[in-house]
C-alpha cells in the first residue's frame, strides 16, 4: 500500500494536479528519502545513456526526455528541503539563502553560455558541449 501511495504522489506531482513536494513529504515521512534521491539520479543517468544510444525517432526521444525530466524534477523539488534538513538549527536561513543564490547564479550562467554557444555556431548546434 505504501508503494502505491508514493507512486500516486509521483504521478500526481508530475502530471500537474499535485506537486513533487508531496513526494518529498511522503518519502521523508516514511524515511525513504535516500531511495527517492537515488532513484531520481538513476532516472537522469538512464535518460542520458538512452539518449546517446537509442535510435532518433520522435517517440524514443519523447520517452527518454520524459524519463530524464521525471528524475530531474524530483531532484529539483527535493534539494531545498534536503539543504534545510541538513543545516544546523541556527543556520537554516543562511543555508537556504546560499542554496537559492547559487542556483540563481547557475541558471544565469547556463543561459548566457548557451546563448554564446548558439551565437558562435550560427544556431546549428545549441546543445553541443553543454
Image: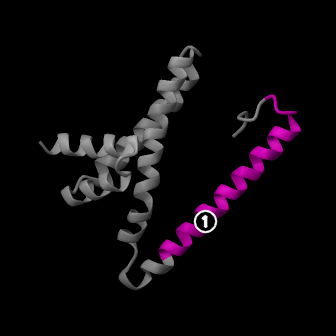
> Is 98 included in the stretch rendered in magenta?
yes
Q: Residue at x 40, y 56 (%)?
A: 78
Q: Residue at x 44, y 59 (%)?
A: 79
Q: Which residues are magenta?
A: 95-124
Where is residue 64 shown, x and y percent of the image? 49, 27
Label 1 secondary element: helix
Q: Is residue 87 left or right of residue 28?
A: right
Q: Residue at x 58, y 24 (%)?
A: 52
Quadrant in which the N terminus is drawn: top left
Label 1 neighbour load within 10 Å: few <14, some 14-19, many 20+: few
Q: What's the magenta bit mostly, secondary-structure-wise? A: helix
Q: Is residue 82 left or right of residue 100?
A: left
Q: Is residue 114 left or right of residue 121?
A: left
Q: Residue at x 46, y 79 (%)?
A: 93
Which residue of the protein is positioned furthest toward the front in this rendering? 17
> How many marks are shown on the rendered structure?
1
Q: Is residue 64 above or below residue 54?
A: below
Where is residue 94 shown, x and y percent of the image? 50, 79
Q: Is residue 94 above or below residue 71?
A: below
**Colour style of the rendered protein structure:** one colour
Where is residue 7 shown, x and y percent of the image? 25, 40
**Rendering quarter of residue 86:** bottom left
Q: Is residue 35 left or right of residue 30?
A: right
> Is 61 included in the stretch rendered in magenta?
no
Quadrant in which the C terminus is drawn: top right
Where is residue 10 shown, x and y percent of the image? 32, 43
Residue at mark 1: 102
Which residue of the protein is positioned furthest toward the left in this rendering? 1
Amino acid at each position: 500500500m505504501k508503494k502505491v501511495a508514493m507512486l500516486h504522489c509521483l504521478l500526481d506531482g508530475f502530471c500537474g494536479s499535485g506537486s513533487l513536494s508531496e513526494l518529498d513529504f511522503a518519502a521523508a515521512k516514511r524515511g525513504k528519502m535516500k531511495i527517492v534521491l537515488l532513484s531520481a539520479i538513476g532516472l537522469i543517468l538512464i535518460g542520458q545513456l538512452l539518449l546517446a544510444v537509442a535510435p532518433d525517432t520522435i517517440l524514443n526521444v519523447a520517452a527518454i526526455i520524459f524519463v530524464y525530466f521525471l528524475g530531474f524534477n524530483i531532484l529539483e523539488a527535493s534539494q531545498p528541503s534536503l539543504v534545510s534538513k541538513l543545516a544546523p538549527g541556527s543556520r537554516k536561513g543562511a543555508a537556504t539563502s546560499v542554496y537559492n543564490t547559487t542556483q540563481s547564479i547557475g541558471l544565469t550562467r547556463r543561459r548566457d553560455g548557451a546563448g554564446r554557444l548558439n551565437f558562435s555556431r550560427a544556431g546549428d548546434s545549441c546543445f553541443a558541449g553543454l
